[in-house]
Image (cartoon, coloured by chain):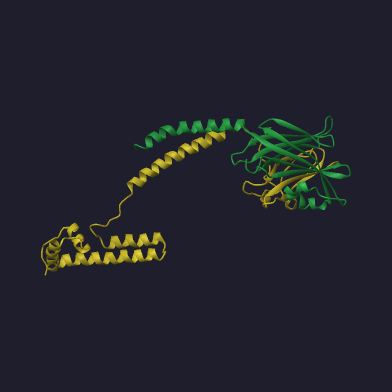
Amino acid sequence: MKLVTPILRIAPLAALALALMAGHAEAQERVSAEVIVVLAKESAGTVDPALADIPALQRAPFNAFQSMEILDRKREQLREGVDRDVELPNGRTLRIRLQRVMPDGRYRVQVSINRPEADAYLPLLQVVTAPGDPFFVAGQSHRGGTLVIGVRVGRASD
Amino acid sequence: MSTDTHIDDDKLQRFYDGELTEGEALVVGRDVDASDLEQERVAQMERLGEVLRAGADAEADGIDANALFLRIERGIEAEPAPRLKLIEGRKRKNRNTAVVAVAMGIAAAVAIAFLAQPATEPEIADSAHPDEGDTALAGGNVAVEDPTHVQLHPPGGSSVELVEFGANTGTVFEVEGERGQPLAVVWIAEE
């Protein structure tokens, strides 16, 4: 019991200190995010080589598109609970918010796509994503094609 | 050859083990030869030694350690010997208590950290696949209809927890990433 008693006394204090440290570190964390806007068309064309790092765009159903052109690629720094807006080429705004960093290292992210004074195209999307793994929002008509928006939060090494 | 002579347990064991000096061994050997009881005690030690040697051989052959220990334990019970007995691990118990205390501390830390997290909206769905019965509704939340088809996967990839399509219709599905991880896709058809 000589060893056990001090441990029992220290354990609650250590637990509290760890919790406070974890909460402080989390509150300070900034997470990088990338939003890539692609115009995809079913007509013959080329696929931008810069999309090679997103193999998912070469799989079904995206492989139905014969051409893919990167219209925009933006990097943002996200903080928990803070909105970041990205203007889309069709006049809408993509709003992204890091809701929280989860205990397992994944991110819970909320996305919406709206146009001022118009019904929201996508009022709310809540996604849990691993660092560096993208998710996609597709379907908006634009310039004879379809917009495919990829969002990547954090990096695989984050 | 029976006598009332009783050789000390420890000395008899050391005699059997060959640890006595030459003079002591001569004396004890003479006493053993003169006593049926002492001869039987030495015979017990021999049988126990055989059990232990068999156990050691079995262990060398990679036989299950628990079965081996059980056999040895039974051998000790069947052939009580003065220098062999099972001893409760008191120090082990203390260590277990310390481990429990540390574990309680860690658990408390995790619990406090968990409680300190801001409240979040309830999770609607882990992920959905277009072939597995997800539903797209205009003007409302969308969730996987059949909870038996919710896919659980290790932390990798992305998955939709909640989506509102507003006035549009849409669907949620997954594509495979470069490492085979599921990547969420929300496809919205504009009305």
- The answer to whether one can see residue A149 in this image is yes
> In the drawing, does residue B147 fall left or right of residue B27?
right
- Residue B118 position, x and y percent, is 61, 32
How many numbered discs, if any?
Answer: 0
- Residue B152 position, x and y percent, is 64, 49
Q: Quadrant of the C terminus of chain A?
A: top right
Query: Which residue occupies 36% across, 66% down?
Result: B57
Which residue sits furthest front?
Answer: A49
- Residue A57 position, x and y percent, is 76, 49
Query: Which residue occupies 16% across, 65% down?
Result: B38
> In the drawing, does residue A6 fall left or right of residue B161?
left
Q: Quadrant of residue B86?
A: bottom left
> In the drawing, does residue B32 fall left or right of residue B118?
left
Q: Quadrant of the N terminus of chain A?
A: top left
> In the drawing, does residue B183 fall left or right of residue A143?
left
Which residue sits furthest bottom?
Answer: B1
- The answer to whether one can see residue B135 in this image is no
- Residue B138 position, x and y percent, is 80, 41
Q: Quadrant of residue B160?
A: top right
Query: Which residue occupies 32% across, 61% down?
Result: B74
Q: Nearer the viewer, residue A65 or B63?
A: A65
Q: Is A54 rendered above or below residue A80?
A: below
Q: Quadrant of residue B29?
A: bottom left
Q: Nearer the viewer, residue B79 or A47?
A: A47
- The colour with which the image depicts chain A is green
- The colour with which the image depicts chain B is yellow
